[in-house]
Image (spheres, helix red, strand yellow):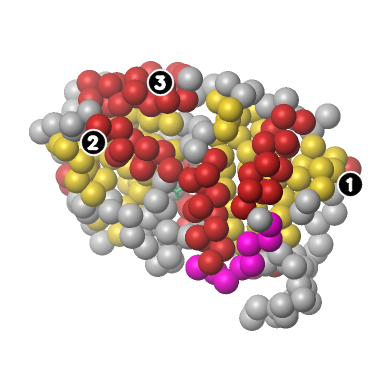
Amino acid sequence: MNYILYDKNFITIEDLKIDMEDRGYQFGDGIYEVIGVYNGKTFKMIEHLNRLERSAKELQIDFPHDFRFLKESLEKLQSLNGLQNGMIYLQITRGAASRVHHFPGSDVPPVLIAYTREMNDNSFIQKKGVECITTEDLRWLRCDIKSLNLLGNVLAKQKAVENNSFEAILCRNEIVTEGSATNVFIVKNGVLYTHPANNYILNGITRSTVIEQCRKMNYKVEEKPFKTQDLLDADEAFLTGTLIDVVPVRKINDYNIGSGVPGSITIGIQQIFNTLIN
Ligand code: PDD
């Protein structure tokens, strides 16, 4: 049986009732996290919950539970569902209230839901790399908040799929920000570049882990903006994100990146990342 965490209770899908006037449903007024589970263990749970807490603060949503209680509840959910490899999806909305745009009264409690899902097998794309497209970044200016409002991301990803590509790499005024659901790195002359963690991107947990590991390996990592043309001219490029981990990019807009196969630095980073999750 698959359980859902609903506020503080573990319930089944049959018992789940979503209010028509939940603000997540009507306004996308909420936040979320996707936490990876590998070999029965959650990966970087504290980092994900810290980011969730930050998103809540930025949007003035009350963080509904004590941090420790939430962590324990998510671990219990994972073990109740017997999840070995997959994800915990967690969202908190501002709650259900009669529809007005402004915040409802403080008597309206936030609504927390979490469920688990088995992981797709990503080994093929991790080994062979993926094709991507570039597209204009149409999102708002607070992409650092992991909000439920994902229309800009959804439209970009749809465009990628329609072009037989894995990911849409977003560019704002000719600067590469991130993917529709991933962070983007390039390698040029042995140096790694990725967009700085500011309001234009989500500061990915996988991104931070990769940067930390690269610095430990004495790779030079520059968190600074680079142009769309730099992306196309890169020696190597890769995407990072929960569950896909580190995925090489071999083609963008039909141009080969480097020699069109996963590069040696990317492969080295994948190997290090695999030792962390296994
Ligand atoms: N997406 N950038 C965006 C816009 C994202 O949506 C995500 C994650 C990332 C990578 O973040 P992390 O390494 O912390 O997963 C970057 C999740 C997986 C999703 O929406 O499904």
**Which percent across, then down, holds residue 117?**
67, 33
Name the residue: 52% across, 61% down.
55
**Do the residues bearing badges 2 and 3 touch, measured as CB atoms within 8 Å?**
no
Q: Which residue carries the number 1 mark?
A: 15
Dominant secondary structure (helix, strand or loop) of the stretch shown in magenta: loop
Name the residue: 85% across, 54% down.
17
**Which percent across, then down, holds residue 168?**
40, 44
Q: Does residue 209 show up? A: yes
Q: Amino acid at mark 1?
A: Asp
Residue 110 part of the magenta-drawn span: no
Name the residue: 41% across, 46% down.
204
Q: Which labelled disc corresponds to residue 275?
A: 3
Name the secondary structure under disc 2.
Answer: helix
Q: Which residue carries the number 2 mark?
A: 215
Numbered range of the magenta stretch: 58-65
**Which percent across, then down, holds residue 9?**
82, 48
Q: Is 37 situated left or right of 134 in this image?
A: right
Q: Amino acid at mark 2?
A: Arg
Q: Amino acid at mark 3?
A: Thr
Name the secondary structure under disc 3.
Answer: helix
Q: Does residue 167 show up? A: no
Residue 96 falls in image quadrant: bottom right
Q: Is 137 situated left or right of 75 in this image?
A: left
Q: Which labelled disc corresponds to residue 181?
A: none
Q: Is residue 201 above or below residue 142?
A: above
